[in-house]
Image (tube, helix red, strand yellow):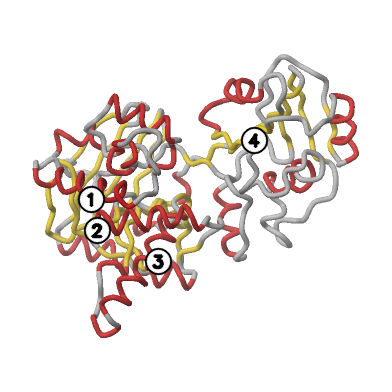
Amino acid sequence: MRVSPITCYRPEPKEAATFAALPYDVFNRAEAAAYVAEHPGSFLAIDRPETAFGPEQDMYAPEVYQKAGELIRQKAYDRTLLKDQTPCFYLYRLEQGDRKQIGVVAACSVAEYEEGTIRRHEKTRPEKTADRVKHIRATGAQTGPVFLTYRDNMVLDIIINAACTADPIYDFTDEQGVHQTIWRVARPVAVESIQAGFDTVPCAYIADGHHRASAAAQVAHDLRAEAGEDAGALPSDEFLAVLFPASQLSVLPYNRVISDTNGLDEDALLKALADAGFSVGAPSAQAVEPTSARHFGLYAFGSWRELCYEGEAPSSEQDPAGALDVSILQERVLSPILGIDDPRTSKRVTFVGGIEGTEGLERRAGSTGIAFSLFPTTVDELMRVSDAHELMPPKSTWFEPKLRSGLFIRRV
């Protein structure tokens, strides 16, 4: 696959820790507004420009996106953002506890995304893609990287590890306790080595950022149409990405909370689960965190129970997506028993990242809802689904730690 070095705006080193922010879609509207009120210098004010307006403001109105453009120009003017004009790669290391992952910040090809060299596993929602399209057009930039992964490559590991012996340009610990270190790779021989290493990588996979990738592709087509087919290569023909080797990634479960029991009392729910092929454990005050596939935790009516699916299910070779635990839960429980036919649009289901733990599930379910804890989808499963050109149910993977936005702003 092809990767290109980038030129970008990036924060002045002493501003990086306070400027960089978690991705825009980690926050709901109220959470984003509260965070920006407490951290007015954060990039989130640009990523979520509705935070500059009152709660009654239409967050998708033209003036909201115009505000994002004004704010990013202001940050360039006051030199919070510096322009790095030499095409280079950046190496981005995140350390959380005893784990670390090191990715390459680069530009990847929209054409390779569309032809499947960069593979996806999730459907995108038009309104979410449209939001990021408007944001790119208003700011003139790709501001949040697409999180990609690839099968481990020994040559790239050697090149990357050697480059990390230099002095970093950023080195800070964020509010979540994640140690973030970034190196700049600008020497032509090193840039060429990284490109040559990725030439041997057959494909990459979107781990997170499907809507950012979709928006980048739409903007590329729009700007190509405006410039004309004879315009030559355009910056928008590529999109901002960070590429990590698969073995370094940590995936947490993406749990589910249903706001009600769909009219079922406890006995009726447990019978329906048993009829659907689940063995149902005894009630317990101890939270259930599954330790293997086909095992689930159920919180309902004030107690936890362990569920084990013993019914028939597709094999991962025949139907990689259908064999996932998230698919089994959706097809055997959420749809037929609880009436959640389309989890993308249902307002009765909430997806809860495993970072919240089981306490968050109990709190969200309360006395009238139901929570399910799951075993995490693995990176191998993600790749298998993507290779088969299938799609996972929504919210199947939660990658941790999250990449920070605002550290690399690529003009298009």
Query: Which numbered disc, 3 or 4, marks the residue closer to the eye?
Result: 3
Alpha carbon of mark 2 to alpha carbon of mark 4: how far?
Answer: 37 Å
Q: Residue at x 35, y 65 (%)?
A: 219
Q: Residues within 10 Å of mark 4 (few under 14, many from 20)?
A: many
Q: Answer left or right for 63 relative to 112.
A: left
Q: Are marks 2 and 1 in contact (CB under 8 Å)?
A: yes
Q: Residue at x 46, y 69 (%)?
A: 117
Q: Which residue is mark 2?
A: 140
Residue 211 in picture, x, y percent from top left: 45, 55
Tag 2 or tag 3, which sits nearer the N-term?
2
Q: Which residue is mark 4?
A: 256
Alpha carbon of mark 3 to alpha carbon of mark 4: how far?
Answer: 31 Å
Q: Residues within 10 Å of mark 3 (few under 14, many from 20)?
A: some
Numbered badge on residue 218 = 3
Amino acid carrying label 4: it is: Arg
Query: Which numbered disc, 1 or 3, marks the residue closer to the eye?
Result: 1
Alpha carbon of mark 2 to alpha carbon of mark 1: how far?
Answer: 8 Å
